[in-house]
Amino acid sequence: MLLIRGHAGGTTLTGTLYERGERPPTFEGAPDEGAPFVWICDEFYEVESGGQLQRIDGQERRVAFEAPTTRGFDTREAALAAAEEHVRTQFARLGLAGDDVEVEVVDDPDADDPDFDGV
């Protein structure tokens, strides 16, 4: 399992890439179990009212969350490229430039966060 994190505007978005042999969570809309690589991450956008109030790039913004995106891929490279694009797109939906998003890949979530339990 890899964590793909995008940092921009003073906040972070993290998605999970399940690799070959790992079991991604199952839920409605999840990709075919046969996909060797599965990307799961939230989607969100800015709204005028409702949503959750977040401080992003020095401004308070109301953010609404959609059901997580799940996509299956045949190769690790394709999954990583799609994950990076997804993270950049979410920040762009809040008005931040995709080029301003710093993306990192965390290969060992347990080493990065000793309290991480894989959920």
Image (spheres, rainbow, N blue to C red):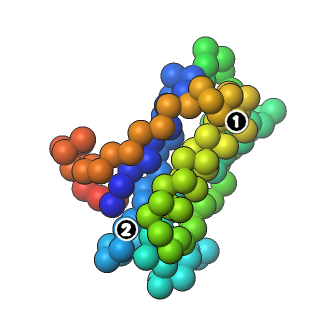
Residue at the spot 47% in from the left edge and 83% down from the top edge: 33
For numbered disc 1, what is the local secondary structure? helix
Three-letter code for the amino acid on which mark 2 is drawn = Glu
What's the mark number on residue 83?
none
Q: Which residue is mark 1?
A: 92
Crowding near pointer 2: few (<14 within 10 Å), some, many (20+)? some
Q: Is 18 on the left or on the right of 94, as rendered?
A: left
Q: Is 89 on the left or on the right of 108, as rendered?
A: right
Q: CA distance from mark 2 to mark 1?
A: 27 Å
Q: Is 20 on the left or on the right of 5, as rendered?
A: left
Query: Where in the figure is residue 16, as x and y percent of width and height?
Result: 43, 56
Residue at the spot 57% in from the left edge and 66% down from the top edge: 70
Which quadrant of the view contains residue 57?
top right
Residue 88 versus residue 64: which sits nearer the camera? 88
Query: Where in the figure is residue 67, as x and y percent of width and height?
Result: 62, 59
Residue at the spot 60% in from the left edge and 61% down from the top edge: 69
Looking at this view, name the residue that lies furthest to the top.
Answer: 58
- Quadrant position of the C terminus in the picture: bottom left
Query: Where in the figure is residue 58, as x and y percent of width and height?
Result: 61, 14
Residues at circles 2 and 1 in contact by the CB criterion of under 8 Å = no
**Residue 19 visible in the shown view:** yes
Three-letter code for the amino acid on which mark 1 is drawn = Ala
Instruction: Indicate whether 48 appears above or below 80.
Output: above
What's the mark number on residue 19?
2
Residue 57 versus residue 92: which sits nearer the camera? 92
Instruction: Indicate whether 48 appears above or below 29.
Output: above
Residue at the spot 19% in from the left edge and 45% down from the top edge: 111
For numbered disc 2, what is the local secondary structure? loop
**Residue 26 visible in the shown view:** no
- Quadrant position of the N terminus in the picture: bottom left
* Of callouts 2 and 1, the N-terminal one: 2
Which quadrant of the view contains residue 118?
bottom left
